[in-house]
Amino acid sequence: DNPELVQGWYRHRRQVVEDAEPNAGHRALADLEAHGPGVAVVTQNVDDLHHRAGSSTVIELHGNITHNYCMDCERAAAPDTVDAAIQEGTPARCPECGGLIRPDVVWFGEMLPPDAMERADAATHRADVFLSVGTSAVVYPAARLPVAAQEQDAYVAEINPDTTGVTDDVDESIRGPAGEVLPDLIDAVAERV
């Protein structure tokens, strides 16, 4: 009902994300991908930090806040289109069809992009090892991915500061922040790849 407010809020959030830097955990996952084929990062985060850390196979289940698109024709829209409209005090509109521009993120009540979920499922089914990192494991359908990996006989390890709904079901549970745990874990794995 208030596109200017929504676009302004997301512009602010996008700026916060652009000012953030990938942590050691993001970089460790990118290093793992560089050591062997078949590594995919499936994320519920919308912050683009995996890409910025160097990962190339990133499946963003909830979208990417740095991207926008037209709600009518679905064309991609540059962030500066939104920024210019906010400066003028008007809602950002598609230069092609005039439709409203929105961030390419999943809002509450919306379905996940089918192609992202299909890619996540495919990566899960191919996995020999599945790392569940920093997730509460309560947001579905992503929360079912560790279970699906186990059903395919993958070794499932959870890296999280807290216990979750999958802690008792995984093969290994490591307590701690991803930025501290992943670099050592990935170094150990990379030596064996």
Image (cartoon, grey):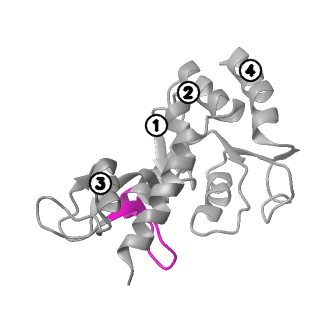
- Please state if 94 lies on the left or on the right of 51 as rendered: left
Q: Which mark is residue 84?
A: 3
Residue identified by numbered label 4:
187
Quadrant of image for the N terminus: bottom left
Task: Answer with mark 2 or mark 4, whichever residue precedes in sequence.
Answer: 2
- Please state if 184 lies on the left or on the right of 111 as rendered: right
Q: Which residues are magenta?
A: 102-115
The x and y percentages for residue 192 are 71, 17
Task: Answer with mark 1 or mark 3, whichever residue precedes in sequence.
Answer: 1
| Residue at image location 54% in from the left, 21% down from the top | 34
Q: Residues within 10 Å of mark 4 (few under 14, many from 20)?
A: few
Residue identified by numbered label 1:
57
Question: In the rendered structure, which amino acid carries the disc numbered 3?
Answer: Ala
Give the residue furthest to the bottom.
1
Quadrant of image for the C terminus: top right
Task: Answer with mark 2 or mark 1, whichever residue precedes in sequence.
Answer: 2
Question: In the rendered structure, which amino acid carries the disc numbered 1?
Answer: Thr
| Residue at image location 45% in from the left, 32% down from the top | 56
Report, in whole angstroms, how far the alpha carbon at label 4 lies from the one at label 1: 19 Å
Residue identified by numbered label 2:
33
